[in-house]
Image (tube, coloured by chain):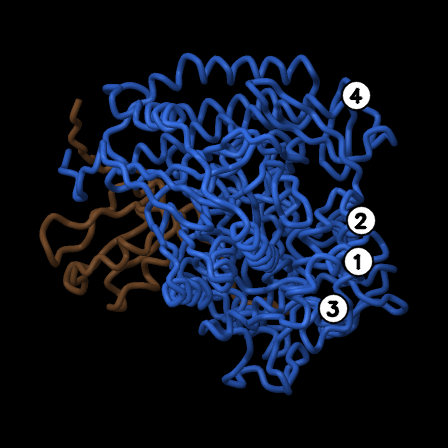
Amino acid sequence: MERQWPYENQLGQEEVLRCDVLVLGGGLAGCYAAIAAARAGQSVIVVEKGATARSGAAGSGFDHWEVACTNPCCKISPKEMAEAFIDEQDHYSNGIAHYIECREGYDRLLDMERFGGKIRDTEDEFKGAAFRDDETKLMFAYDYENRYTLRVWGSTFKPALYQELLRLGVRVLDRVEATALFTEETPAGKRCVGASGMQVRTGKFYRFYAKSTILTMSRPARIWLFHPDLVGLSEFRPTQSIGSGHAMGFRAGVEFTMMEKSVKGEFSAAGRSFPPYSTGNNHNTWYAATMVDARGVEIPYVDRDGNELKTVLERYLPAKGQKFFLKGGVIDEPKYEYRGPETLPFEELMRRGYQLPFYADLSRMPEEERRVIWGMMVGEEGKTKIPVLQSLTERGFDPEKDMLQSYGTGWQSAAFLAQERQLFGAPGGIIHDWDLKTNLDGLYAAGDQLFASDCCGFAASTGYYAGRKAASAAKKTDFGQISESDVAKEKERLYAPLYVEDDMDWRELNMAISKAMQNYCGGIKCKDLLLEGLHLLEKYEREDVPTLSCKNPHELMRTHEVMDILTVSKMIIQACLLRESSSKPLCFERSDFPAMDPAKDRHFITIRQENGKIIAGHVPHDYYGDIEEEYEKRNQDYIGGGAQ
Amino acid sequence: MSISFTAQTYPASARPLSFDESLCMGCNRCVNICQVDILLPNATAGKPPIVCYPGECYYCGSCVMACPVPGAIRLRHPLMNETKFVPVKKP
């Protein structure tokens, strides 16, 4: 049944707005960026495609905050932790951002508490538990000895941040998608002078003039994994978080790195896997659940030396002689130095006669460990309160009496094929300096738009830091000029699909891109294959994008997303062509260049676009210098002041 | 050229959201919190919203969390995503 569009038709209308600091993306990074800039006395606009109170990857919640090294119970210094991350990721890591996360993350949690978010067990629900500090009431995950990762009540966070934005007088434009960056040429190079947006319910066009602009949108998605029927389940992150910030950045000349990195799929509940955190497993949110096999025989945990652990508590402690271990979002199979307790590898379990399927059996755990996994962690983690905790409870699941099945052979709840890939586990993104500034003057980035990003603590702390630096730059600069012809071109690009009658739906193009990326940029890559893929994507852009057709601003937004997915896919293929060797840490395999991580290529390869040409760059891994020294050199105004 | 917008429910194999008409007041809080914007307000005031784009649902549950009347809105994953559980076994 065709119905009338319930919202106003504002097609052809344009609103021009000015602000000191423009934040594109209202997720965790964007909200903290806006708060920092507003605290610095700047006028701030946040542009958010969804609803800021619940939007972004952390919108409905999250359960733990990694590497909050300055919390009063932590035994690891920020420098030690950030350097461990860099080492663990073979230097394909973002030293600047990780250090900021380790150094300032806890300040952002204290901010959150002031805004009304819950970061400690104020109701004494877990009093006396091994993971709780009874004095501060802070609760910890993973390493109970070193206490660097906090369990938090993340479902309270986004609504609290939204209220704080309003309280600070930040102008929040919900339901407005950012679509393009505007730049001007200056004697010193290109400078970002603002951006455009479109209201996704009414079609109104926005032109923003800003002294500083911060990109805080998502990492790209729906590149390889796309399900045209269950679109929203295609990937781990939200439906609309597909990397538009990367696409508009690339179009404007922003420099990226590590875009050749992609990993074999881990989550796609439209396909092979189950909803995240809804299956029996012992990782992340579920660490360190007791696992059993089909017969109910317990699966042993071992330390890094293979010693079987006797108690549940030992699963949360470093091995003998080990200072600390690493666990968390981007840590997969850590080096010996950082390896924590783990269940025996699957192959070993098969050798020993363990039988599938496996289950998580929380009934065998101490009462407070059971309750913190099922009820707090599963509950606070994004997409768990309603679809997992409430739904399974309604179906009769009782963690004291039932065990939850595990699928496949590992924690990912499914075995994906090599060509089913995702940007996950510290993927590529924008390369930046110590101000989190991009190669364009006036343009900053934070959160998932930075290269090698990971979790919520990373998003919040880099967001705030970028907001601070962008605000301080805005104070010293004036508004630039936005070219009328750039605006006219952008309007033409944006609204064209509304004028095409009954032709290609955006889903058809997304499906074609994903299939092309699986075929031409899958597990094993080589020059000829990549070039064929690029050729096909260019054909889609030239011949098929002009046939995209839609009937209202919502569908137009989805159409824009797929146009952005196409831009990002082309960038990924170009980045893959630039690295002429294979690399283990980048999960990158070239059949024409099989040598693994040769010395000549052990650095960041960067990519940007200039006048339609691809420009490559080479940046040493340690370009950021000594992380502590360089940080302190540039942040004396913040040190000591901490959170306001 | 002026264009008028139209909407047509885009069907999906799954039905992520259902409303209990006797409980829903049509306050549209779910419509306005959904970051994916899959719902449209009902043309009749006080009636449940229209799930216009069910296939785009991200199953985050924010709509249910925002709903002032328990039970008025229900979120359910596609059947294939129902995880299995069994009574605990002791060897």
Residue at the image position 75 percent from the left and 20 percent from the top? A591
Drawn colour of chain B? brown
State the SS at label 4. loop
Residue pointed to by mark 3: A315
Packing grade of label 2 (10 A; few <14, some 14-19, many >=20) is few
Q: Earlier in the sequence, mark 1 or mark 4?
A: 4
Left or right of residue A154, residue A628 in this image: right
Residue pointed to by mark 1: A629
Three-letter amino acid code at the position of disc 4: Phe
Residue pointed to by mark 2: A625
Residue pointed to by mark 4: A593
Packing grade of label 3 (10 A; few <14, some 14-19, many >=20) is many
- Label 3 vs label 2, nearer the camera: 2
Q: Which mark is residue A324?
A: none
Is the residue under label 1 in contact with that under label 2 (CB below 8 Å)? yes
Q: Earlier in the sequence, mark 3 or mark 1?
A: 3
User: Distance of mark 2 from mark 1, alpha carbons?
Assistant: 8 Å
